[in-house]
Amino acid sequence: MGRVDVLVVGGGPAGMALAGACTRLGLTTGLLDSAPDKPWTATYGMWSRELPADLPASLVAARAAGRAIALTEHRLGWDYAVLDVPALRAHLADGLTGVQIHAGRAVGSPEVGVVALADGSHLRASVVIDAGGQARPLDPTTSRRVPAAQTAYGLIVDQETAAPLIAPGDAMFMDWRADHGEAGWPTFLYVVPLGGGQVLVEETSLARRPGLPLATLRRRLAARLARHGIEPPKDAASEKVSFRIDHRRHRGPGVLGFGAAAPFIHPATGFSLATSLALAPQVAAALAAHLPGDPGTALTAARRTVWPFEAKVVHRLRRIGLEALLRMPPTEVPGFFEEFFALPESHRWTYLTGRDDLRGMTAVLGRLFLGADGRLRRRLVTPTVLPPVGTNEEPVSAEGQRRYRKVSQ
């Protein structure tokens, strides 16, 4: 193909939304994905107040009032919306009229405006967007640090089976009670209706370096369900989740990171879809204001749209919060979330959604710090003066080492 104005690498929700927004503004647009027709299998949702105004109501499969349990139970004060994923995909695909779709795997960007594919071919554009998710195929920077990841294992059951956990119209955002009966790294239960009488029940590790193994989560979920008298069907569909939550901002030269690749992922929730859908038309407008005439200025304008100063600082503060959680003894994590859920609703909303609300974020952190005891205050401050946690793997005891050597001999 010839050179286009914009080439979006990655055909997930973020990439499709941005490609569609660009072509609607008259930009010649390409979309590259290794499997552009592959169905999406992840569960996508967002807070109801974040739903874009132009998103058809039919795309919402279920709405539920959010609850959370740390040491006590809390009502979040707003609803959670779970999307009909096939309908969302079809909706975004309808917006790709005029977009040039390419099947192929990006392996890098050898020069500005060029994307190299695994088959040896190249695609060219005035501005290149990396919306390739956590793989970030156009960001060559590497890190020696073990990635921090959110992992989860879930089962899809019917509403009657899930009744001991949630009532109709409810969603359990987090339940930190150790109903699974295990000590060690803390995990929580996440329960949301999917529509059509189905419910997702999922054991989740919010953050760990490295991610908690799915086998552990599967075992804990089975134990937790059994404790509540729930026996899921043998053929229940499962959901397996594992993604990095501590990526630095995208640093590919001459490339704009977008979506999870940017990264938009909130380290305290793992959410990024609402941000991607909200920013797609804004980024497209920033590009259209300067293309095709001035690609460099267009890229700069788009970067400023994605990462204004306030968003950069908030991103940094969220990362500090992540490191605080990674350093926190497992037994103290539910107590931390008890303090968080006890904050005023406006503060909780700002922390969970306000990616560029720097004033609001500093107010939240100040309120949380003042309400914490001395121990929690130290936990919150420590990551600002110490390097990131290397690993959360438990050290092997001397006895364990002796046993290992004996078995190895």
Image: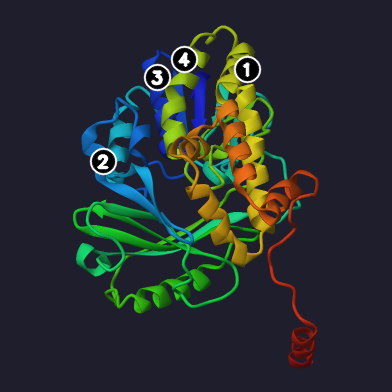
From the image, tell me which residue sits under label 1. 300
Q: Where does the image place residue 106, in percent across and percent down from the top left? A: 56, 39
Percent x, y for residue 298? 58, 14
How far apart are the alpha carbons under marks 1 and 3?
A: 19 Å
Nearer-N-terminus badge (4/2): 2
Q: Earlier in the sequence, mark 2 or mark 1?
A: 2
Q: Is residue 15 visible?
A: no
Q: Which residue is mark 4?
A: 285
Please state which of residues 147 and 388 is positioned toward the viewer in this rendering. Answer: 388
Q: Earlier in the sequence, mark 3 or mark 2?
A: 3
**Image: 335 above or below 18:** below
Q: CA distance from mark 4 to mark 3?
A: 11 Å
Q: Residue at x 56, y 25 (%)?
A: 306
**Label 1 amino acid?**
Thr
Q: Is residue 338 left or right of residue 56?
A: right
In front of the other: label 4 or label 2?
Answer: 2
Q: What's the amino acid at mark 2?
A: Val
Q: Nearer the viewer, mark 1 or mark 3?
A: 1
Q: Report how far apart the C-alphas of labels 2 and 1 lie in the structure.
A: 35 Å
Q: Which mark is residue 20?
A: none
Mark 3: few/some/many CA within 10 Å (<14, 14-19, 20+): many
User: Residue 103 lies in what quarter of the image?
Assistant: top left
Find numbered disc 1 in the image and state the secondary structure of the residue it sits on.
Answer: helix
Return the residue at label 2: 60
Write the residue at 40% across / 75% down: 222
Numbered-mark total: 4
Residue drawn at (64%, 46%) of the image: 321
Q: Mark 3: which amino acid?
A: Thr
Amino acid at the residue labelled 4: Ala
As drawn, is 42 to the left or to the right of 288? left
Q: Is residue 307 left or right of residue 221?
A: right
Q: Earlier in the sequence, mark 1 or mark 3?
A: 3
